[in-house]
Amino acid sequence: ISPGYCWPFQASRSQVDIRLPAQVQPTAITVQHPLKKTSGLGDISSAPRDFTVSVTAPLCFVSKGVDEEGGEETLLGTFSFNIEKEPTQTFPLQNTLPRAFQYIRLLVLSNWGQSSYTCIYRVQVIGR
């Protein structure tokens, strides 16, 4: 049994814009990273620590996405992934919006000590 493959980000601070398969009114986000005991190397310092979630339109998709009036990024919350808890953690969004979006931005502000890269194994957007 393996935790799967890591989605590596260069450095300890990185971001990714995720295009969802459909418009979603997000209510929570789930982030997954294996526990130390199930990690192949026994080191989970590459796990994300502090991160933000926002809705946005990436540069290559400016015409489709977020806010048709201005395309501005809207912060949905700031969170901390705790490596002492479960490998899959769900974070209810602190700010909810009354409409659906197709793009979510995950900005990793820090990890648990790995300076070269940050790994995420799964990100799920929960919503209507």
Image (spheres, rainbow, N blue to C red):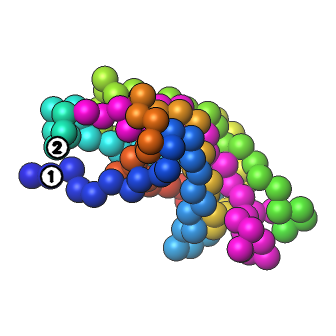
Q: Which residue is mark 2?
A: 40
Magenta-drawn segment: 43-67
Task: Please state the horizontal and vertical placement of residue 120, each as a whole percent of the image.
Answer: 39, 48
In contact (CB < 8 Å): disc 1 and disc 2: yes
How many labels, in total? 2
Give the SS element for disc 1.
loop
- Indicate whether 33 appears above or below 49: below
The quadrant the C terminus occupies is bottom right
- The answer to whether 81 appears left or right of 27 in the picture is left
x, y percent for residue 35: 24, 34
Label number found at residue 2: 1
72 is within the stretch colored magenta: no
The residue closer to the viewer here, 20 or 95, is: 20
Q: Above or below — where is 102 with respect to 27? A: below
Q: Is residue 36 left or right of residue 57?
A: left
Residue 122 vs residue 14: left or right?
left
Q: Residue at the spot x=38%, y=38% of the render?
A: 46
Q: Nearer the viewer, mark 1 or mark 2?
A: 2
Secondary structure that dominates the magenta span: loop
